[in-house]
Image (cartoon, helix red, strand yellow):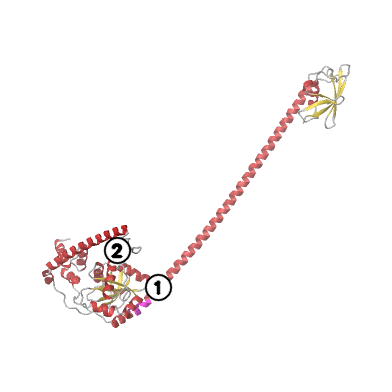
Amino acid sequence: MAEGFEDKLAYFQAITGLDDPDLCAEILSAHNWDLELAISAFTSSSNPSSSTNPAASAADVDGGGGSNPAESSLARQDSGNPAAPGLAWKLITLPFYVVSGGIGLITGAVGIGVWIAGGVLSRSLNLLGLAAPRGADADRLIPVSASTAEAVDFVAAFERDFGGAGAGIRFVAEGFMDALQRSQREYKLLFVYLHSPDHPDVPTFCSGSLCLAPVAAFVNENFVAWGGSIRRTEGFKMSNSLKASRFPFCAVVMASTNQRIVLLQQIEGPKSSEEMLAILQRVIEECTPSLVAARLEAEERRNNQRLREEQDAAYRAALEADQARERQRKEEQERLEREAAEAEKKHKEEEEARERAAREAAEKEAALARRRQEKAMSLGVEPEKGPDVTQVLVRFPTGERKERRFHSSVTISSLYDYVDSLDCLKAERYSLVSNFPRVSYGPEKHSLTLKEAGLHPQASLFVEVDS
């Protein structure tokens, strides 16, 4: 910043008593760094009035706004004011402003100290159980924005000075942007009141016009009302944005695009309750069609959005149902494949068992055939009849009979070999038994010869299968 700009900033701070250099720089920048014009706009409520402007202006929410003929709707009304004090007078009274600013800082510091001390004392009494019970939210510190705090202070002061709560206009206790957004949500216009505490016409206007029941009821029913003091940051910003040049000052605005507002009507200077009602009724009549159209458009958007949400929900439900059916189909297919695999495995195992049993049976049959052949070979050639030859008859459980001649000197085990060589008996464990007398020729008699066993010259035996 150039040295001349720094000097202007210092003078402006000293004269206005503002402590925020950024805010001071913003005010000076809005007035093209014209020190006298900026000081006059800040300290004076009686600047020369501008001529009647037939077009409404669109202003930036954050500061100086230029006119926007495309967004104009109603005529701007104002009247003349006496001339403001010049720069020379302000420089003469500079010491007074400097001293008063210092006193204000000291008073503020003392006030903060007392508030902190009171808070500590109250908290201590609460902990000791000596303080009176308070509301549920009394002990909770809720942080709010600076603009909201200013709005709360303004509402409290206005109700204190011009009537109890609910007796007049219900100003919203929130910042300007929040109030503007509220008016959008409720499809109403925003009624703005900028309060100049030092202006002589303000008390009469508030008590005799603005707060009268007809005006207050009409504003409360048809508008969202926001108020602010021009001695506070946001109120001063809005006075610059709306180009307030005469007080009492009211305006009707609505939201536009790109964080801008459309100024629909200015009401400057003292007005009677009848004049206020006439102006506000005319604004409502002219803006009702656009508000109704905006409401219908918003309802249509909501209906379309709800329809899309319902369609999306139905699509998601159908998709989930399709996915559930697909999962069920896959699970059923997997179950069938698993059962088929298990059946195939079981069939394969049974086939292998049959093959194994057949193989074992074949091996067993082959072994028996070899055994029969070996037994037959071990018997040798059947001898011819003679005195040393024994005739043996063997009867099988099936009723089949077999007969053969043996030398009387062979042992009983030869008889077993003979039975084993025949294909008449499938049992592996059996005994040869004679009937009269009944004699069993078990393993203990295998070594006896036929003559020693009493089977010579002939014998009749039957096969008895062991259980």
Which image quarter holds the N terminus?
A: bottom left
**Which percent across, then down, holds residue 360?**
70, 32
Q: At which x and y percent is residue 139?
A: 32, 61
Q: Callout 2 environment at 10 Å: few (<14), some (14 to 19), or many (20+)? A: few
Q: How crowded is mark 1: few (under 14 residues within 10 Å), some or many (20 or more)?
A: some
Tell me the number on the disc at residue 145. Answer: 2
Q: What residue type is labelled 1?
A: Arg
Horizontal arrangement in the rendering, residue 234 relative to residue 398 (left or right): left
Residue in the image at 28% along x and 60% along y: 122
Question: Toward which corner of the image does residue 151 lie, by quadrant?
Answer: bottom left
Relative to 203, residue 383 above or below: above
Measure the alpha-carbon separation of dots 1 and 2. Answer: 30 Å
| Mark 1 in CB contact with mark 2 (< 8 angstroms) | no
Type of amino acid under label 2: Ser
Depth check: 444 or 167 in front? 167
Region rendered in magenta:
283-289
Q: Nearer the viewer, residue 230 or 37?
A: 230
The percent coordinates of residue 55 (x first, y second) are 28, 77
The part of the image, by quadrant, that contains residue 185 is bottom left
Residue 79 found in image quarter: bottom left
- What secondary structure predominates along the stretch shown in magenta? helix
- Say whether residue 179 is left or right of residue 317: left
Total numbered labels: 2
In this view, 422 is above or below 296: above
For disc 1, the marked residue is 295
Q: Residue at x 41, y 72 (%)?
A: 297
Residue 257: tell me if it is visible: no
